[in-house]
Image: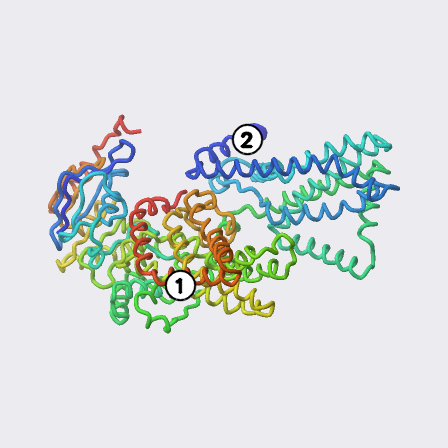
Amino acid sequence: MSPIKLLAQFFHLERKDFLRSPSFDTSLVILILMGLGALYFAVVFVGLGIGIYFIAEEVAPQNPFGWINQGIWVFWLADLIFRYMGQKMPITKIKPLLSMPISKSNIVVFSMLKSVVSPFNWLYLFLWIPLYVVLLQQDLDPVGVTTWILGVSVLFLANNFLNLWANNSPWVFGIAFGALVIAGAGKYFELFDLKAVSGGLFEAFYQTPATLLAAVAWLAFLVWGSHRFFLAGMFLDDRFSVKAEVARTTKMAWLDSMGRMGIFLKNDLRLIARNKRAKMAVLTGVFFLFYGLLFFTNAIEVYQGAYWKVFAGIFVTGGFLFSFGGFVPSWDSSYYPLMMTQKITYADYLKAKWWLIVWATLASTVLASFYALMGWEVYLAVLAGAAYNVGINAHLVLLGGAFVKTPIDLTSAKKAFGDKQAVNLKTMLIALPKIALPMGIYALGQWIWDAQGGYLLLIGLSLLGFGLRNPVLGWIERIYKKEKYDTIQAYKPKS
Amino acid sequence: MIHIEQLSKSYSGTTVLDIETLQIPSGTALGLVGNNGAGKTTLFSCLLDLIKPTQGHITNRDLRVDQSEAWKDFTSAFIDESFLIGYLTPEEYFSLIASLRTVPQSEVDTLMEELAPFFNGEVLGQKKYLRDFSKGNQKKVGIAATLIGKPSVVVLDEPFANLDPTTQFRLKDLLKKIASQGDTTLLVSSHDLNHVTEVCKRIVVLSKGKVIQDLETNPSTLAALETYFAQQVPDASIG
């Protein structure tokens, strides 16, 4: 088969994979959301492309073009970092292809081509083209401007391959990271001036058109290198073999005294300790602890209102509640049928999860004591947030869980944020009161009495919610039972 | 006694299970055979209340499985990997199941000793999580766990598949022993006619969701089944 025909065949398979995937509806929604995001960036880029030269004229009237060249390295670096975080080597499902009469090289070429059509690349057209048009109208050499714009776009495209390579090879990542550290240190100790280096480098594309060849050579080197790297790595035992970890068993006997709930708690603690995805959720909770600093230090002006303090109080103590609790019962999705056939009542199951969430919230509250240093009012907001999380939000996340029907792949750390469940309308509706409602309750109390009254009203209602725990959990249990068959069906592994 | 009456399951108009009546007295070892798509796993899933039948219901010891949960006290099953917890070691998994069924750890240890030949030294003390075991060894763990606490109803979907020949023979002996004791209702589905006729005293043949044959096992059963399956012709209406 000719390479072109082969590529066409690959794209054909890719299209079917998308259209026939079991989660087609949700992928479509995500695609639309991504489309809107891309549209946003396209607009911003067009604006930037048109505007940047005129901004430069304002800032550096003597040499606007030189100013752009001096600053462009920041943009280039940001591009690389964003790619590193967001752009992965597109996965071609190669397992069934490996034994086919297709050269491995072609499979790699296809994957790399696929990476080129990523928005990380084509969105830049919205920046470079307007910028090129604007620059042509200035008092600059048109040939130089042409080689300049080509050189810049080649360097940004090269980031595509640099990222793919660095993302998969610790060596390349190390070298790139080392280079960044050296550059950073150089700037910090004023050994050399990145602005001048960048200015000189990019200016060269304009002054000496032949330097374009150097950029192309850099791109070619990265394409060649990453192609070689992926080709060498394309064996089943390299990419797909399971690296068995040595199991460590802790008895956790202290939980045995807690009866049936202790059984579940023990299992949940093992779940968290042994799975990347669950560890990430706990880590997110820890990050949330410091989220309040943004609000309470008045670092950001729009966050200074009292309502935002309530908002922060909820977030500071509720990190685990949102990141872990929000995905109950999906944590157990891979063995849900087992749970459903054992002597397990939803009541015990839910209560164990509830305790786990409450413990974590209390632990966060203790850890968040340092906010007391910022005044008793800040601390009151944290305490009120904690009370609301325990008294009301703990119920709400469990309620939302009845409608979470996205299985979780425990072993993968990716996708821990912004999962598909984000587009589930029902869970969104239940998520709203978790944050908006306490702000409203506070506002009501503040309106009737004063700020303290607002916090006290919040705490009072939370105590009421806490007191009603058993009937509320009983009600949630009935919803779980009703959703049982749908949930089992949704958690079935889809190949 | 498991009692199935007028049970049917259809997905958007296609009937995958349609059983008029099927009684399984307590202590029976029943083998379920049939080609792919015959409805074996669907029947088991209905029995375990994992899917809701379109019509009819199943009672397990007079308990309607979709209304009561008490049948879970004396029923155990291994259908597929979703009955295993990947991040536990086999030992932890067994003690989790034991504690859920309120079985003392000592009883688990005794059972594990009895199962040593079946495990063939590849399950216990491996310092590995279940997700890192091979499919065959995962299956051994899943089957072993169904025996914890001597449940009176044991459901195994394709227990022989994925096992190496030695383990298949040992599993067959194990199941035969359980069947001969006569106090366990054993439901086994299999594509291996040889094994299943040896283990089970009664064989039910399913085809497209219907019970086609219901035989007491005797020396000629295997031959009869082989003839039946050899004569199956592709059905033009399916596809």
Q: Nearer the viewer, residue A282 or A412?
A: A282
Question: On screen, A369 above or below B219?
Answer: below
Residue A274 shows up from this direction: no
Q: Quadrant of residue A132?
A: top right
Q: Secondary structure at mark 2?
A: helix
Q: Secondary structure at mark 1?
A: helix
Chain on which label 2 sits: A
Residue A365 location in percent, x, y? 50, 66
How many numbered marks, from 0 up? 2
For badge 2, the amino acid type reads Leu
The residue lying at 72 percent from left, 46 percent from top is A75
Q: Is residue B82 left or right of residue B63?
A: right
Whether discs 1 and 2 lie on one chain: the answer is yes
Residue situated furthest top in the rendering: B236
For badge 1, the amino acid type reads Leu
Task: Return the residue at label 1.
Answer: A463
Quadrant location, the N terminus of chain A: top right
Residue A50 location in percent, x, y? 74, 34
Which tag, 1 or 2, sits closer to the chain's start? 2
Quadrant location, the C terminus of chain A: top left
Chain on which label 1 sits: A
Q: Nearer the viewer, residue A67 or A435?
A: A435
Residue A461 location in percent, x, y? 41, 60
Q: What is the CA distance from the residue labelled 1 to the residue labelled 2?
A: 65 Å
Residue situated furthest front in the rendering: A448
Disc 2 crowd, CA 10 A, few/some/many (<14, 14-19, 20+): some
Task: Return the residue at label 2.
Answer: A6
Q: Quadrant of residue B228?
A: top left
